[in-house]
Image (cartoon, rainbow, N blue to C red):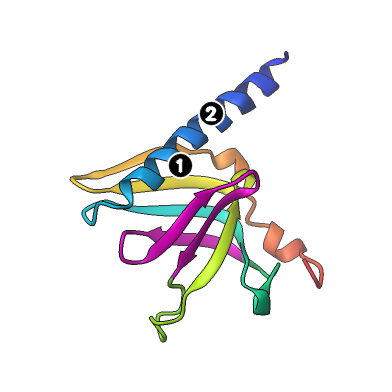
């Protein structure tokens, strides 16, 4: 195994552990997370597959529900529309697109940071239908 593969496996392992902790801690109203990534993908029928670039999503016990770790990534229901807080969207953030995870509770910590994944130019390179 080469060094790059080993680093990727280590990064994947760290990300998985942080996400498992996130899912477990979301029941605590004092703990909040921000997951930042290159994009998220809508999962509800009327917008299925639509990507929103430069994703920075707040997760807490009162803003996100039904959080699931799948083979594809982190999937959950979340309030995205500040003008309609009754509107709930189901989204997917693929693991390979997650750049940072910030945790706040009794203080702020950064349990996951991988700036090598950050691809801000992706939003300019998108083609119709992507």
Name, please, the residue furthest toward the front.
Answer: 66
Q: Quadrant of the C terminus?
A: bottom right
Q: Report which residue position mark 2 lands on.
A: 13
Q: Is residue 8 above or below residue 109?
A: above
Q: Residue at x 56, y 63 (%)?
A: 91
Question: Mark 2 near mark 1, Cβ–Cβ under 8 Å?
Answer: no
Q: x, y percentage for residue 59? A: 38, 58
Q: Is residue 119 above or below residue 39?
A: above
Q: Residue at x 29, y 52 (%)?
A: 27
Q: Main secondary structure of the magenta part?
A: strand
Check disc 2 and report its element: helix, strand or loop.
helix
Q: Report which residue position mark 1 lands on.
A: 19
Q: Quadrant of the N terminus?
A: top right
Q: x, y percentage for residue 110? A: 37, 41
Judge the density around disc 2: few (<14), some (14-19), many (≥20) Cα neighbours within 10 Å. few
Q: x, y percentage for residue 54? A: 57, 61
Q: Residue at x 31, y 66 (%)?
A: 62
């Amino acid at each position: 195994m080469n060094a790059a593969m080993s680093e990727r496996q280590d990064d994947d392992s760290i990300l998985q552990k942080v996400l498992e902790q996130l899912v477990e801690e979301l029941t605590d109203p004092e703990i909040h997370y921000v997951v930042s990534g290159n994009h998220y993908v809508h999962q509800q029928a009327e917008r299925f597959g639509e990507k929103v670039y430069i994703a920075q999503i707040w997760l807490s016990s009162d803003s996100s529900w039904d959080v699931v770790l799948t083979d594809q990534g982190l999937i959950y229901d979340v309030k995205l529309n500040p003008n309609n807080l009754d509107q709930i969207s189901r989204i997917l953030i693929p693991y390979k697109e997650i750049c940072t995870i910030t945790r706040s509770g009794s203080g702020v910590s950064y349990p996951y940071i991988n700036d090598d994944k950050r691809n801000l130019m992706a939003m300019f390179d998108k083609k119709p239908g992507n």
